[in-house]
Image (cartoon, rainbow, N blue to C red):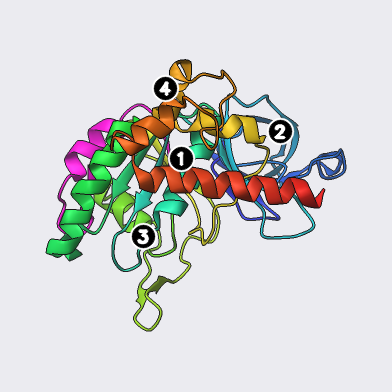
Amino acid sequence: MVKSTGSWILVGTGSGEKIPCRIKGHFRIKGIRTTNPVAVGDRVEFSADPENKEGLIRKIFPRDNYIIRKATKLSREAHIIAANMDHAYLVVTLVSPRTSTGFIDRFLVTATGYYIPAGLIFNKLDLYRKQHLETLRELFRIYEDAGYPCLAVSALRGDGVDNLRSLLQGRINLFAGLSGSGKSALIKAIDPHLDPRIGVISETHQKGMHTTTFAELYQLQNGGCIIDTPGIKEFGLVHFEAAEIPRCFPEMDRLLPQCQYNDCTHTHEPRCAVKEALENGKISRIRYNSYLSILNEDAKKESRT
């Protein structure tokens, strides 16, 4: 599936056609607790009506993976951002607008928890001043030490775009990020033949205007695909147990065998290798604080159920 607009789903065929399809009714009532029973990247079976040039999705094949977040609509638990990807990238900006480390870490926890290789693309390098470049170097160190590849690019000037283009080749890649992070402009820089909608930043609030309304899959000319997603304001975690959270911080997970307890939460236990590494500066306090924040959110959620 290459695009979802809510009522209609654009399905790509092996011959390169794109057929607008609807979903067969039973998908909407068979216990699915997400806002979207079909996501961009899904493999589906559909029947076509040549006369009306539209189709009906009859089957959704099992997903290799998917990335999901808490739904903003209270009637559903979660929203599937995309499925069946090879790599997930968060497009990060340190200015205009600023992406918080809390947002970054929730995205990475979700990708890691669903076994999706993830990385960070720091965009808008052309806007960075001295203090931003210092922050960039520190964040590179933190996240690369944790095991996440990082790139710095400028969609406007072209810095780092050639390197990024080569990394995307032959893969299905997800691009996610805040509204205004420049995902669409970056896609255009990667492949000038594509024409995603590019928006502007509100000068008053330094927030992006929503230009990508629905997720869409773009085929790159040099091979590979990019799934462009609507800008996200928040990234709420769903379907995680408290015991799973430490496993989703790779730098902490690597130290778990050195802890006294094999179910160590890295909060209060004696002889905790993670707390020792934190005190020695070998684990980022920024990442550790994100970890505690996520744990506390999970504890509050359990107390309400």
Q: Is residue 303 left or right of residue 109?
A: right
Residue at image mark 1: 108
| Residue drawn at point x = 56 percent, y = 30 percent | 114
- Give x and y (percent) for residue 97: 35, 67
Spatial CA distance of label 2 from label 3 is: 35 Å
Determine crowd level at label 1: few under 14, some 14-19, many 20+ residues with C-alpha closer than 10 A. many
- Give x and y (percent) for residue 251: 39, 29
Amino acid type, label 4: Leu
Spatial CA distance of label 3 from label 1 is: 17 Å
Q: Which of marks 4 and 1 is in front?
A: 4
Residue at image mark 2: 46
Whether residue 148 is visible: no
Residue at image mark 3: 181
Tell me the SS state at disc 1: helix
- Give x and y (percent) for residue 58: 77, 33
Tell me the SS state at disc 3: loop
- Identify the mark at residue 255; answer none if there is no mark: 4
Span highlighted in magenta in the image? 151-175
Spatial CA distance of label 2 from label 1 is: 33 Å
